[in-house]
Image (cartoon, grey):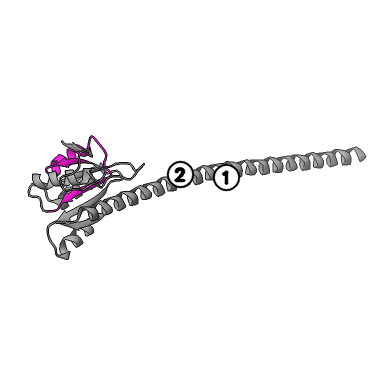
């Protein structure tokens, strides 16, 4: 496992882009069987404010996901050991994704790859070679969207819990009212019974 963080020295490409002040670093998992592609992705993305973990195939990626959480997972579609689509399916089935988004990358310029990736559940697809500024923008957009979705889900869960508690409270109140009505009915019946008994006693005394 390799984790690449932003270096103090200037990138050889001249790239000085980094995270904005106060902006947290996102954790990325990049899955690709090409070691050169992994190295380039790690260097370029780390200099744009991301912490990058590398996996040389889908099996290694699944193992890494058992130990840590990621904001976004970038998967190369054209892998031999375990294809990008199969890797994504196993990740989803594992229950280890959490709130992480998935971006698929491919070297195919036709639309079939994008359609296939998105149809199988990827959040984004990008064709390589790509502009790293564009890739960075897409990564941040996906991570932000995932965070917003997670926030909405938490708010929805909290609202559901409040509704459930209120329903219980209303149920208890309704039960208390029904018990009060029953007590009143019993009291009225007792008063009526006593009234009837007094009338019988009064009638008997008159005779």
Q: Secondary structure at mark 2?
A: helix
Residue in the picture at 43% in, 48% down: 156
Q: Residues within 10 Å of mark 1 (few under 14, many from 20)?
A: few
Instruction: Give, as a single range, the part of the protein colored magenta.
Output: 52-77
Residue in the picture at 56% in, 44% down: 171
Q: Is residue 109 left or right of residue 173?
A: left
Q: Quadrant of residue 125?
A: bottom left
- Along the line of sight, the residue nearer the viewer: 189 or 155: 155
Mark 2 or mark 1: name the one nearer the start of the chain.
2
Q: CA distance from mark 2 to mark 1?
A: 18 Å
What number is the disc on residue 170? Answer: 1
Quadrant showing the N terminus? top left
Q: Is residue 59 left or right of residue 152?
A: left
Indicate the position of residue 119 as horizontal and vertical percent values. 22, 59
Indicate the position of residue 70 as horizontal and vertical percent values. 26, 42
What number is the disc on residue 10? Answer: none
Quadrant showing the C terminus? top right
Q: Residues within 10 Å of mark 2 (few under 14, many from 20)?
A: few
Quick check: can you spot residue 97? yes
- Along the line of sight, the residue nearer the viewer: 19 or 190: 19
The residue indicated by pointer 2 is 158
Indicate the position of residue 155 as horizontal and vertical percent values. 44, 46
Magenta stretch encompasses residue 61: yes
The correct choice, above or below, for 167 with respect to 109 in the image is: above
Residue found at the very far right of the displayed protein: 206
């Amino acid at each position: 496992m390799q984790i690449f963080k932003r270096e103090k020295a200037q990138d050889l490409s001249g790239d000085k882009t980094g995270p904005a002040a106060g902006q947290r670093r996102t954790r990325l998992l990049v899955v690709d069987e090409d070691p050169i592609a992994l190295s380039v992705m790690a260097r370029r993305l780390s200099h744009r404010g991301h912490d990058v973990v590398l996996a040389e195939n889908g099996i290694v990626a699944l193992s890494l996901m058992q130990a840590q959480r990621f904001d976004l997972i970038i998967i190369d579609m054209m892998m031999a050991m375990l294809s990008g689509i199969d890797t994504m399916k196993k990740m989803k089935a594992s229950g280890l994704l959490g709130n992480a988004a998935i971006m698929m990358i491919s070297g195919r310029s036709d639309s079939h790859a994008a359609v296939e990736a998105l149809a199988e559940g990827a959040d984004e697809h990008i064709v390589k070679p790509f502009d790293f500024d564009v890739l960075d923008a897409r990564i941040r957009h996906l991570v932000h969207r995932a965070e917003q979705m997670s926030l909405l889900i938490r708010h929805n869960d909290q609202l559901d819990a409040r509704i459930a508690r209120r329903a219980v409270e209303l149920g208890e109140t309704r039960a208390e009212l029904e018990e009060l009505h029953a007590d009143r009915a019993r009291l009225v019946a007792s008063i009526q019974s006593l009234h009837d008994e007094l009338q019988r006693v009064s009638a008997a005394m008159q005779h």
